[in-house]
Amino acid sequence: MISHSGAFADSGNEVGRPTQVAANENSGESLAGLESWQKKSISDQLTRLHHGSSPASTKVEEVDAKPRLSPFANEPQIAPLLKLPPRREGTSRRSTPHLHPLQEWEGYVLSVGPDSFTARLLDLTAGSAYEEEEAEIPIQEISERDRPRIQSGAIFRWVIGYERSTSGVRKRVSVIVFRDLPAITERDLQEGRAWADETRQLLGL
Amino acid sequence: MIAATPPSADELEVTLLGPGYGESIVLHLGGGTWAVVDSCVNSNGAPRPLDYLTSIGTDPSVAVKLIMVTHWHDDHIRGMGRVVETCKTAQFCCASALLKSEFLTIVNSLEGREQPGISHGAREIHRVLSCLRERSSTPVFAAADRRIFTGRTSEIWSLSPSDAAFTKFLTDIGQLVPNMGKARERVSPLAPNDAAVACWVSVNGTAILLGSDLERKGWIEILQSTVRPSGKAAVFKIPHHGSANAHEPKVWQKMLEADATAALTPWRRGGHSLPRVADVERILSLTRNAFATASAQPPKNQVRRRTHAVQRTLREGGMTIRQAPISTGMVRLRRKPNPNATWQVELAGSASHLAEVVDQVA
């Protein structure tokens, strides 16, 4: 039975594991009585199932020429309903924007003012060994989520480059992200203590 | 143009280099024996004390007999790891607090795993310690009123840190202990700098006072000592870039000759710089013979050129980038051991008389 309350009535439905069957508009009797928008919605959801993705997914799908079959493909009463259009060979689509960097720095905050902060920068693009530059950066350039992290000593990554969206539009961007460096672990401290003891021993202390 | 020749065997030399990240002092103690105090790098990342010694035809690997570290933070001793690696016959000296277990634990926890990119503030001292470990080389510890080096005609004494400053330093480094589970950050140098090592250098009866970054409280403790070397110094490396925080008038009265030759390295970070106009005027009221290795103001037009797209993005975002304060300035002082000899002052690169810095700062 097709549910009329929506494409899939089972709210606990997991992607790729339909518990209800649906049909495309070519299935005949099974779709009788559905409005056209309901048929389209079902078809869309089936397509997503077929590709193994959900509306929130950002996974990039690779397309191959052979259509993948649902686990129910061999069920006699279900198989005729699952006539989906074949995948087009060679089509792939990025599901996330792509950033081409022109300039990258790693930096740390020196001081924070009311409207801007000062930072020392290590030029990663030039392969610098030492921080040879200082920057004055308006706080408004930092995302609101990261602003509480603007403190003396905080380390960040700064990239200027071209971003290409999923639709192919290119724009110039400047992205500053405060890094979540690996946290200090008990192991780090134990190793530190062991190194300290060994150092003192080697130095005759 | 400074002569690229070494001093004569009996000639005393004090050369102040910087600013880079920090400063460095190179001393000729007589007979081809040299000492290096702290380190900074040039724009190529090479340690300036090594560059200088090589430029005057001196081989640092055999000539340098003492290396002193007066600070531990990266911003003050950049390149020191390479200095220690190169100067294989030198005795290493630092404050004993830097070799306490607590401090070593912190250093290795932060920098123990070699990672590219920005250091966490202790990378250079980690390099130094790693080099000493490889050699199993026992350091000499600097503390108040301790003779740390004896040469044929020279002596070097550390005047600080005092016992109280040492104890405070151990307490303060507790702040640096990274909390477990907390993301790593870059540690900042402890301030005020009461644990910096000030030194008294004596060569053939001529004394030089090296002030490091020691602040006023540390100087008051030094003046109270009854066992420090007596006499007055002819040369003063002014502490902490000439700041008022590090000025103690009694140092000029009791420890320095009248009109002593003085030198400092400026400092700047963001929009702040030292010495300020008031600092310059104060120093010039105490001696006419005062010099600086560079201007306190940022050099003009020293920004790395980048693509038009990058420049435009910076402009549109209201972001400015300038060269960090790395200069080629040098103040070199040489004097023969004659009692009536005067100091030969040579200035190179951006170095100038301190009076010229007033015009630049104002």
Image (cartoon, coloured by chain):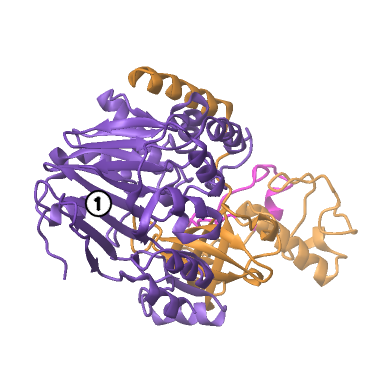
Chain colours: A orange, B purple
Residue pushed farthest right? A5
A37 left or right, relative to A107: right
Give the residue drawn at x 63%, y 35%.
B179
Q: Main secondary structure of the magenta part?
A: loop
Q: Chain of mark 1?
A: B
Give x and y (percent) for residue B348: 24, 68
Look at the image and say whether residue A60 sits in the magenta stretch: yes
Q: Which span is picked out in magenta?
A: A59-83
At 30% from the left edge and 69% from the top edge, which residue is drawn? B351
- At 48% from the left and 35% from the top, the residue drawn is B225
> Is B94 displayed left or right of B30 in the figure?
right
Inspect this view and state whether residue B82 appears.
no
SS of the residue at dot 1?
A: helix
Q: Position of residue B113 (x, y in %)?
A: 42, 36
Depth check, front residue: B191 or A98: B191
In the image: residue B245, left or right of residue B212 = right
- Which residue is disc 1 drawn over? B49
Along the line of sight, which residue is nearer the eye, B182 or A65?
A: B182
**Residue A73 is at least partly visible in this image:** yes
Q: In which quadrant will I find the N terminus of chain B?
A: bottom left
In depth, the one of B18 and B313 nearer the eye is B18
Total numbered badges shown on the rendered structure: 1
The quadrant in which residue B134 appears is top left
Q: Amino acid at mark 1?
A: Pro
Vertical side of A189 occupied by B268: above or below: below
User: x%, y% of residue B74?
Assistant: 42, 47
Where's residue B156, x and y in %?
30, 37
B99 sits to left or right of B245: left
